[in-house]
Amino acid sequence: MKKQLITALVALSAWSGFAQEITVEGPDSHLKVDVTIKQGTPVYSVTYKEKVMLEDSPLGFVANVGDFSRNMTLTGHAVDKIDKEYQQTRIKQSNIHYRANQLTCSFTNADGKPMDVVFRVSDNDIAFRYEMPRYGETGSIVIEKEATGFDFPSFTTTFLCPQSDAMIGWKRTKPSYEEEYKADAPMNTLSQYGHGYTFPCLFRVGDDGWVLVSETGVDSKYCASHLSDATAEGLYTIAFPLPEENNGNGTVAPGLALPGVTPWRTLTVGDNLKPIVETTIPWDVVDPLYQTEHDYRMGRGTWSWILWQDGSINFEDQQKYVDLAAAMGYEYVLIDNWWDTNIGHERMKELVDYAHSKKVDVFLWYSSSGYWNDIVQGPINRMDNPILRKQEMRWLRGLGVKGIKVDFFGGDKQETMRLYESILSDADDHGLMVIFHGCTLPRGWERMYPNYVGSEAVLASENLIFQQHFCDEEAFNACLHPFIRNTVGCMEFGGCFMNKRLNRGNDGGTTRRTTDIFQLATTILFQNPIQNFALAPNNLTDAPQVCMDFLKEVPTTWDETLFIDGYPGKYVALARRHGESWYIAGVNAHKEPMKLKLNLPMLHKGDKVTLYNDDKKSAPCAESITVKKDGELTVTMQAEGGFVIK
């Protein structure tokens, strides 16, 4: 679209005849970004409904071709409008209309080298990035560090997950985005490891509103970033990976060809949590990187490892989980680590054929590497080697395997981003979907890669097996994810337990604190297009029938998502639509019952709905109820319980 000056969109004023302040607003004029130069530093600030969400925050970077963070001059600007409609599977909505106003600010550094900062501002979202031209004969650039910052008002509190030390944890595989959140913490709280915080990062700006900070569009051309710890003034800055990540392999500083662009940094802003939960900004500003000739089918799956662990990766136990998937009407079975030694490549054809005879398709597990951690679970040393990877994928395609789960990445360097992209691209060539585990946050990947179907990147279901502490905190964590982790990308949590005791016999190990209906609610609250549920064959006979019937029909893809009510870490209720059917789900992290009066615009007086709820003894039940008043329904959630309305 031809760039034009829109006076209603951008205001330009002179300061002392030299400094300039440029303002860009969202289409409804509530969200505003101001850009200017202060003492040679480019800065921006953000207001929403005249409330300050970000104070003057630095822009720019230092590169091997020059310093673009100080002694800068604002040389011009241009404006444009973005009006884009697109369809997208595998996220919280299927049809999206993205409207934004775009501002491009042009700067030069002390050496006269130009750089642009491009802002896109919609009603509740901001995305911005740097764009660099070719500098004469210089055709490449290394970004040594970013000055990009986010300076919050002093009364802001935080909901953040700390960035881990590198090369710690299981077989030296961290960081893998699996640390514990602190809720409503002051900004001067130092992160657990002293390395800042993983994206996404949620901030409550007192009573004025909420801001979610993240990034999107990260591919092989850049590293994944995170936020630093805050300064005393409340300033967070973009931080690059630690040198020790991936056992020291790969550079910290990303390099790219010129002309080039950085990933988009994103802010979702509102005076309530609705824009945070419903945002589609991670996908609005990116495009598919390649087209696929394959028709990938989303769905549900079973996996033995979560409850039966390593000992179940054998032919006979995997047949039992194929049978469980068939009995539930599920599309997939996931066969986890050690299958290459315990079942073997030769006999895998027999197992895959058995699954196909039951109308069940197969995902197989792989380690991502061998040279940056100490993992022994196989198969290893295949996915990181282009030659072996392609050989393996040809074999998988010949078997009729539909997807792979690739685990234990342990880093955010550009080298690791290249590996993610290479695995996805090669897998699509062979008609394979990809789940990542022990991994980084997806950053717009559902739209960028057509065969990408999920990432863990969260303190997921396996931790409930490992320590009672995580069972005790399950409800708290579940009330965080719809506002933070899961709002910016699909989340392969691997949950929904029907066992009360989390072991093979349902008679030992850790004890689940949450109710059965709580578990059902998470199948709606946690969004991932392929859901591998934590069911076991014994659940066909020992779990409440009302729960198993629900789990036979629950969808995994959604056409619409609406935030209903909630507060991070305390409770949450949201609604998702699949086709013509609405599913409204909620969970309660409190230790006492909670009554909610719900405003549900999709319900009308006289509608009959099914309410799945816990009785006073926390036993699951389902009843048909009639809506008495348009859009209104009252439910009670038991302590660490939940509800689902269909």
Image (cartoon, rainbow, N blue to C red):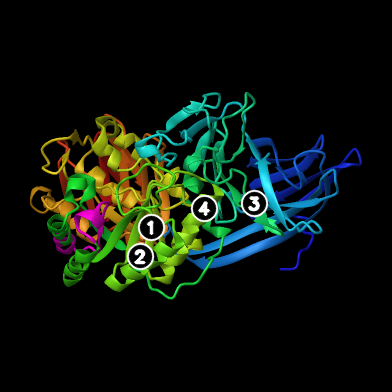
Of residue 260 and residue 535, the one placed in the foreground of this image is 260
Give how far apart the Cα atoms at labels 4 and 2 are.
21 Å
Pair 4/1: label in front: 1
Q: In this view, does 411 lie above or below 603?
A: above
Which residue is labeled 3 in the image? 255
Of helix, strand and loop, which one carries label 1? Answer: loop
Mark 2–mark 3 CB contact (< 8 Å):
no
**Image position of 444 (left or right of 567):** right
Give how far apart the Cα atoms at labels 4 and 3 are.
12 Å
Question: Which of the two discs, 4 and 2, labels the residue nearer the N terminus?
Answer: 2
- Look at the image and give the residue range highlighted in magenta: 323-344
**Image position of 72 (left or right of 302):** right
Of helix, strand and loop, which one carries label 2? Answer: helix
Mark 2–mark 1 CB contact (< 8 Å):
yes
Q: Residue at x 44, y 56 (%)?
A: 384
Q: Where is residue 449 in the image (x, y as percent from the top left)?
A: 48, 63
Mark 1 nearby-residue class (10 Å; few <14, some 14–19, many ≥20): many
Farthest residue to the right: give it: 17
Q: Is residue 146 above or below residue 331?
A: above
Q: Where is residue 642 in the image (x, y as percent from the top left)?
A: 27, 42
